[in-house]
Image (spheres, rainbow, N blue to C red):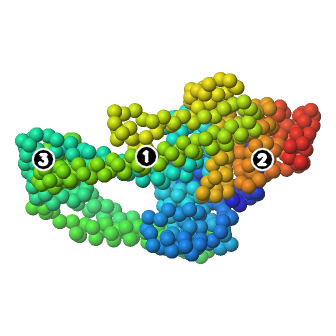
Amino acid sequence: MLEDLTIKDFALIDSDYIEFKKGFTVLSGETGAGKSILIGAISFLLGGKSDVGQIRAGKNEANVSATFLLNEPPVSKEAQAAIQADEEYEPKSALEWLFMHGIEIENNRVLLRRFIRANGKSGAWINDTPVTRSDLAAFSSFLIDIHGQHEHQSLMKVSEHRKFLDARAGITAEVEAFTQKYALLVSKRKSLSDYSMSESERLRKLDMMKFAVEEIGVLKLKKDEDTALEEEEGRLSGFEKIYSEVEGINQLLSGGEEGVTGALKKLMRSASYVSGLDKSLEKLSSRVESAFYELSDISDEFSDYQSKLVFDPARLQEVQDRLSAIYNLKKKYASSVNAPLSEVLSFYEEAQKFIEENESGNDKKSQLEAEIKVLEKEILTSAQKLSDARSQTAKVLEKETDEILSNLGMSGTRFGVSITQKEGTDAVQKCGPYGKDDIEFMISANPGNPLQPLAKIASGGELSRVMLALKTIFARTSTHNIETLIFDEIDTGIGGEVAVAVGKHIKNLSKNTQIFCITHLASIAVYADNQIKIEKSVSGEITSSNVHPIEGEERVCEIARMLSGDAQQAQSLEHARSMLQKFSGGY
């Protein structure tokens, strides 16, 4: 679970430290106060996008860090052995991931830190170990699941429905393996199609590919060589200008007492003298001294650079000749003369592959046909297994979702999973990259009505509740044992009794899971065990977002504001107290 969060100079947040508790925590505040900024800071910490625009105006660096308590059993000896024996081992828990990466923790707690600077540089750590953004994202996927503000809209994309069903069936890894095998089949079919051309066409193309391999191979090209050569040509062609400019720089820097370093040396002596008379000037004197030594070092390096500058017309001609040869290759084997050299190298590899596969003639064709038959049989078998797993899970998912939707104020609603077989003229063509099934979620909003496509029928409020139901199911069944869920405005399109039902559902869900929820609705907020308020303040021309827990009368006032927009109206305050007493057992 998330224990604490520290944010420094992130967007509108100046500096905030928040401690979190178990259970259901609501994040509230007026529109524009910065609630989504808090979620954005957490997303950034977990490996989300980084952008210099996230840095608070006038600051040079944004920092976010958090402590997590890992409530999971230690890595078993069997898992340790599997990890050490298999480089492709997929970790099944946060502790397994840490073990794989040699990161030790104390008291089952782990500290995540990430920063971004105004120059675009960023960095991240897990405890004291620096990690990449992708590593941070991979590890944090075991810790938190964030339901984005508009994530329920993904239910409008039918392509996403298969992913939900496969996740519930626990076959995501099997589907990925199937996709790789299917790609191999497609590749082999393409190779076989090359053999289907006439013999004269095959031999003509074979000759062309052999010529290309010889023409490209003789140059022994290196990756990105053209870029390096163009840079070198620029230096050699501009030798006189470079030499003249560097000579001028050296004169400015080290031209005796009139040069910058000479003047700085005099300045350093004067600053040192006055700082001896007034101690308050010591820091300024130290900065002058640092500037002198820094510029002296720069002067030495420019001087060293100038001493090594040599004009080499022979090398210039050599570079230009090789660039010309590369230009000619790009005209023939790349999309344009401005294309990256990698296109020529890719063509070279493809040509080599074609030669290898076609020189042996019909023997290779027969081998490919046999390999394709084996692959087709394996793919059909795998596709059927995936389809069987999906069919079985669809029934379970329908029942689970209907039960939750009933609790969320959608009693009488039926959720369905449509699974149809792909169209095709033969068994093989009925398979695609993810198997033989087309999957779409369906819904009947009223008893007696037939199931219809969810993406076409459901309203925004219904989509939000269907997504909440799916998230609830995955929280129960996830093999990752994710302990923290964040819902960013799950209350889209709902209100009244429905909002009460949603609040009650989230409250029940929080008995085993730490839940954070951004909401504008008091009828959801009153169910929370804890409430955090985000407020915007303006000092001069500086705008800040401040985050702090609220309880007692302060919470009553906030609930009253959420009810009527007036935090001081007596009727609203009384209503707020009544709701808090009824739904959260106090305040």
Answer with left or right where residue 16 lies relative to residue 567: left
As measured in the structure, the alpha-carbon distance from the residue carrying label 3 to the one carrying label 1 is 47 Å
Q: Position of residue 336 (x, y in %)?
A: 20, 41
Amino acid type of the residue that numbered disc 1 sits on in the rendered structure: Ala
Amino acid type of the residue that numbered disc 3 sits on in the rendered structure: Asn
Q: Which residue is mark 3?
A: 328
Q: Which residue is mark 1?
A: 383
Query: In the image, which is nearer the foreground, mark 2 or mark 3?
Result: 2
Q: Position of residue 321 (x, y in %)?
A: 10, 54
Image: 316 above or below 574: below
What residue is drawn where x is 69% and y is 59%? 1
What residue is drawn where x is 90% and y is 36%? 575
As measured in the structure, the alpha-carbon distance from the residue carrying label 2 to the one carrying label 1 is 40 Å
Query: In the image, which is nearer the foreground, mark 3 or mark 1?
Result: 1
Considering the numbered disc 3 on the image, is that residue within a helix, a strand or a loop?
helix
Question: In the rendered structure, which disc, 3 or 1, sits on the residue that comes first in sequence?
Answer: 3
Q: Which residue is mark 2?
A: 507
Q: Are marks 2 and 3 in contact (CB under 8 Å)?
A: no
**Quadrant position of residue 220:** bottom left
Considering the numbered disc 2 on the image, is that residue within a helix, a strand or a loop?
helix
How many neighbours does mark 1 have within 10 angstroms: few (below 14), some (14-19), or many (20 or more)?
Answer: many
Q: Position of residue 32 (x, y in %)?
A: 68, 38
Residue in front for this viewpoint, 298 or 180: 180
Question: In the rendered structure, which disc, 2 or 3, sits on the residue that comes first in sequence?
Answer: 3
Answer with left or right where residue 23 lies relative to residue 252: right
